Image (tube, grey):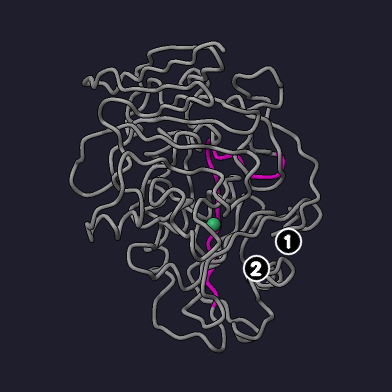
Amino acid sequence: MAALVTVLVLAASTIGGPDEDAFLGLEPRIEGLQEAATDYDRYLSPLGDVRAVMLFARFPDSTGDETPEELFELLVPGAVEYFERTSYGRLSLRVTPVPRWIEMDAESGSGDYDCSRFETHRRYIGEVVRKCDPDVDFSPYDVVYVVAAPSPGLPNSPTLQALPGDGIEADGVELLHGVTFGNDIRNDHWGWRVLVHEMGHVFGLPDLYGYAPASVHEYVGGWDPMGLLTNGSHFLAWHKAKLGWIDEDQVMVLEDDESAEVLVTPIGTSGGTKLVVLPIADDQAYALEVRTRDTEESDEPGVLLYRVSTSVASGRGPIQVIPARGDDDDPELRRLYARHYNALYTEGTVLDDADHRVHVSIGEATPDGYLIAVTRPAE
Ligand SMILES: [Zn+2]
């Protein structure tokens, strides 16, 4: 990660709350990847055409016999379709491959390309860009992808996020956004889903899986690709609001002493109210949306409840699902979700938080979605 020295500049689009910096009723508290409004002066906008160039790197200690064409197929078509579908047509990812191997100067395990450190991560991308520069015009591209052959020094696929002045110069432009794809793209069912997760970071979203070994999938399981990405799920509606894939009038923010019954439509359909937000502090809210499990068989929809904090950092649980019931022992769902695969509520009381005077119940399941009844009595 780049050093966190940026000045927080908030997007003009804010919803609810008296504070003009508030997003969905919550105020910004921390910098970098977080759950308040995204600073699109720093992160890439996820609307319209996003243009990427995909380069391919091989190190002296690389193995494998994949071709660049095979790796492009593994990573790109699925992600392009995913973004088109889940953004309701608002994001078009266009990836141009340069399908030949770039031979790197040093071994992947040498430390010269340590992707956990900004300087060496930038050096890695910079060397590939420099070696491609004679026959690639980098000026049209928003983001650079480097895909490595299987290499012992590159276990995962981090994002490079440079601040202006710290990026990689080429063809009169400064490249600020990059992703280097490592060995994890070859995990079972990961492939293009890794690209989706890393683009989430390029677009300003935090990690929802836990960095502490004891909490890896404790927070959201597989309900958002910033958590477990195996099932290729939609982003949470909170993230879709951050990304601008759902509009202000598709979000219902109910502050203290506001009560309402709201028809919420499933995340997989476009249009209608997608998210109900109940702020309980300047930096905390409950959120509700209607989901189905993203599995092969079509599951019944239900209501997903979670808690959002703008004070909690990436990888520490800024969003936490509050499940309807605990996990039983379903090996397939455990593979796809790890945790919280029984999270969806389908009837009755969803939430009863006396301390914050919030009561939520399901009024009725309709063909269009769920009527969600929220009661927030005055003190
Ligand atoms: Zn991540």
**Which sits in the foreground, 132 or 26?**
26
Task: Spot the residue most to the bottom.
Answer: 61
Q: Which residue is drawn at 60% across and 19% down?
A: 16
Question: Residue 178 location in percent, x, y?
Answer: 61, 58
Question: Residue 7 location in percent, x, y?
Answer: 80, 41
Q: Which residue is drawn at 52% across and 20% down?
A: 253
Locate the N terminus and report the quarter of the image it occupies.
Answer: bottom right
Between the C-alphas of marks 1 and 2, the distance is 8 Å
Q: In this view, does 154 lie above or below 218?
A: below
Q: In which quarter of the image is residue 15?
A: top right
Q: What residue type is labelled 2?
A: Ile
Task: Spot the residue most to the left.
Answer: 297
Residue 40 placement, left or right of 53: right
The verdict on label 2 being within 8 Å of ligand 1 is no
Q: In which quarter of the image is residue 159?
A: bottom right
Q: Name the residue under label 1.
A: 168
Stretch of the chain drawn in magenta = 41-57
Residue 208 placement, left or right of 9: left
Secondary structure found at label 1: strand
Q: In this view, does 254 lie above or below 318?
A: above
Q: What residue type is labelled 1?
A: Ile
Which quadrant of the picture is home to ligand 1?
bottom right
Q: CB atoms at circles 1 and 2 under 8 Å apart?
A: yes
Q: Residue at x 43, y 46 (%)?
A: 224
Q: Quadrant of residue 124?
A: bottom right
Residue 351 placement, left or right of 10: left
